[in-house]
Structures are given as C-alpha cells and as structure tokens.
Image (cartoon, rainbow, N blue to C red):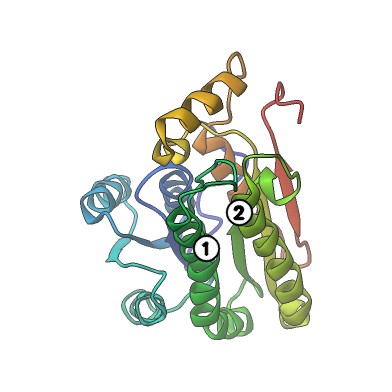
Amino acid sequence: MGRAVTTGTLDGTVALVTGASSGIGEATALALAENGAAVAIAARRVDRLDAVADRIREGGGTALVIEADLTEQTAARAAVERTASELGRLDTLINNAGMMLLGPVLDAPTDEWWRMLDINVRAVLNCADAALPHLLAAAQDSPRGVADMVNVSSVAGRVVRRGSAVYNLTKHGVGAFSESVRQEVAERNVRVALVEPGATATELSSHNRPEIREGIQHRFAGVQRLEATDVADAILYIVTRPAYVAINELLMRPTAQAD
C-alpha cells in the first residue's frame, strides 16, 4: 500500500521493534525497513520473526532477529546492546510488545493480571531503560538531529470500561510514563510518542478466554477495525517528522467505534 512518506527517509538509522512477530509490530518493522531503516525485531516466537526478517531482506532491507523475553531486564538489555553492536547504533525504539486479557475483577484468574503487568509495563520499562542512553547518543550524532521512542498503548489508556480494569491500569500507566519521560529528554532531542489504537484486526484478543472473546466479537460486530498497517503508518509518520516536530500523543479509532 502507498505510504505518506518518501522511501529512504530513514536511511542510516537503526530501529528496534518489540512484539514484532505479528500484528502492529510486524507491520511497523516492515514499514520502517521500507523507508530505509535497518531493523532489529524482537519477540519470543523466533519462527515468526524469521519470516518477518525474510520479507524485509527480500525487499532489500536489513533485519536482525532477536529472540527475547523482554519481561526479563537482562534480556531487554541484551537485545538493545546486540542491536547497537551488530547494526551500529540505535535511533528508534518501538515499544510495542503487549497483551490484552479482559474480564471482571471479581473472581478473576489473577495470573492474567500478572502476565499483563509483566508484558505491558515491565517490558516497556526494561526496554526504555536499556535504550535511552543509545537514543540520547544517536540524537547527538545523527544528521537527522533527533531520536525516537514510540510506546504503543491503546484507547484503553484513555477510556475506562467495565471488564478491562487491569488492562486499563497497564495502559494508563504507559501513558503516564511516556509523558514524564518525554519531559525529561525533550531538550536533548529525543522524542517520546504515545500511540493509542482502538479496535485493530490483530491476534491481540485471541488470547482471551472463550467467553471474553465472544463478548469482544459481539461488541465490535459491524465495525470495520483498523488494520495493523494503519497503525504502522501512524508510527512511521511520527518518526519521520522534521527534528523540530514532535508528535507526543496519537489516538486513533475505527470511524464506527463510538466509545
């Protein structure tokens, strides 16, 4: 599909995309590579990562596959260091790994809560902690004069609904973290952006219990959901702005999603 930026606008830059084995992460990795970035792709499903890397290389791009559980701080640090070592630098972090497990708080299987906290919060913090020194360095020596951290959140970081209490908690937390870090590093030319997609046609909802999946399908019946490529286009727009332009927050929903 056509994109709103010119191919080659990210030439000479290096990006690390987490949760890159499917959905928004996969689409974003492909979009960044199409526009000239060398891309490290990280997730736990290495077979899926290999397939994404093959697509990038077939298009003439550079891809580095990193199998990692980013909820572990040592793994996140190793992923960032390997990216910088093997690809030469790190200009862009796309903090995309995430999980959505919905349902009432009463009588909830609380192991789902801890899994979401690990992936939606701990992994984001681990990657940000490891990447920020590299992003600050890249902003100083890049011809672009800027580096980017994009944290992929959700409309659930803005709107609270019954049945999504802990998911809401994690995504509101990502939003608060992003804004505070933005204020901390803005004057050093590192942009921090928050992207909040509404209903998107990915496998995100498929990890829910059957009765929860049924409710999700009923709620969005008749709604044409966003595609992963739509969100990737938004992320690409953010990281290809001139150095003096920072998109701090971007909320996007399907047209027919009323709430």
Query: What residue is shown with label 1?
Result: 117
Judge from the rendering whether residue 142 lies leftward or rightward of residue 67; answer left or right: right
**Which residue: 60% across, 60% down?**
151
Q: Nearer the viewer, residue 7 or 54?
A: 54
Q: Can residue 239 be seen by looking at this rendering? A: no
Q: Which of the 4 quarters of the picture holds residue 146?
A: bottom right
Q: Is residue 120 above or below residue 145?
A: above
Q: Can residue 142 be seen by looking at this rendering? A: yes
Residue type pointed to by label 2: Val
Q: Are marks 2 and 1 in contact (CB under 8 Å)?
A: yes
**Which residue: 40% across, 69% down?**
70
Query: What residue is shown with label 2?
Result: 166
Residue type pointed to by label 1: Leu
Q: Which of the 4 quarters of the picture holds residue 136?
A: bottom right
Q: Is residue 102 above or below residue 46?
A: above
Tell me the SS state at disc 1: helix
Judge from the rendering whether residue 237 lies leftward or rightward of residue 209; answer left or right: right
Tell me the SS state at disc 2: helix
| Residue 63 in picture, x, y percent from top left | 32, 60
Q: Nearer the viewer, residue 183 or 8?
A: 183
| Residue 177 in picture, x, y percent from top left | 69, 70
